[in-house]
Amino acid sequence: MPMVRMIMKKFSFKEVRGGILLLVVLMLTCVSSMSASTEKKRTFLQRITPTHVTAQYAGNIGCVSGGVGWEYGKKKWMTEALIGYITRYGNTQSLNTFTLRQYYTPWDVNIPLPRGCKGALKFRPVAAGLFANVVLFDGDFWTEEPKHHYGGSYYRFTTRVRFSFSLGERITYEFPEEWKRWGEGVELFYDFSTNELSVISAVPNKHLKLTDILALGFGARWKF
């Protein structure tokens, strides 16, 4: 642990944040290339059309959030864009957030349904995510610290943007053919997530527990 603390002192929050942003850009670039190579037969319009809508409660992106997403790469990859809402608390005002996130699910497991039940049930035991969350339309949050805050170099981190990673599970019910007019299926999911600032804060602070830096979110998706 002392060695970890010494390493953290050598890097500013800005440098760590820049590294995470670079990782996000590289990951999205690789995924886009993979999508283009594996789905060449699909038209451009088909590739940019969302494949599902998502509704979520909590999970480091807002009290409630909703948006659209795209599945590709044999449904192992998923990109989502969501708008979140944070309710007013005490003297604070309500806030809106925007989240862009990327998921990877390496495998799924077919769950047998009782005799007579139609459709298919699939369980994804690993859903790893990486996402960026931005507070919208509020001057009290900043990307670069204002100069009037102790010269602009006291906090040394952005209060407007958080970069996070998550790990969770999903269960999907795929509709039978006669229900396809209502879509491809529905999915329930949950995620445990944390952000870069929480992890950095926990390294030198032995009083912070794992439960102090983790957030639980859960929700549902309707697949077209």
Image: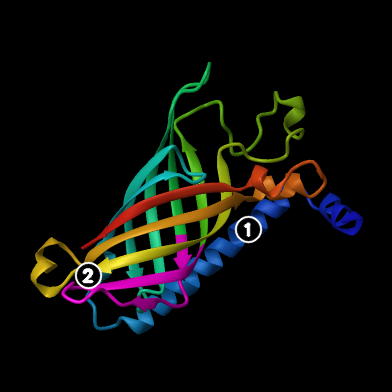
Residue at 50%, 42% in the rendered image = 134
Q: Is residue 105 magenta?
A: yes
Magenta stretch in the rendered image: 102-128
Residue 128: x %, y % from top left:
52, 65
The type of residue carrying mark 2 is Gln
Q: Which residue is mark 2?
A: 46
Which of 141/108 is in front?
A: 108
Disc number for residue 20: 1
Neighbor class of circle 2 (other Cα within 10 Å; few <14, some 14-19, many 20+) is few
Relative to 79, say whether 142 is above or below.
above
Relative to 180, say whether 209 is above or below.
above
Q: Quadrant of residue 22?
A: bottom right
6 displayed left or right of 177: right
Residue 81: x %, y % from top left:
38, 52
Residue 67: x %, y % from top left:
32, 49
The type of residue carrying mark 1 is Ile
Neighbor class of circle 1 (other Cα within 10 Å; few <14, some 14-19, many 20+) is some
Residue at 54%, 57% in the rendered image = 166
Relative to 216, say whether 37 is above or below.
below
Relative to 137, say whether 166 is above or below.
below
Structural distance between the alpha carbons of marks 1 and 2? 31 Å
211 displayed left or right of 221: right
> Furthest residue to the front?
115
Residue at 87%, 56% in the rendered image = 1
Label 2: element kind: helix
Circle nearer the N terminus (1, 2): 1
Q: Is residue 129 magenta?
A: no
Label 1: element kind: helix
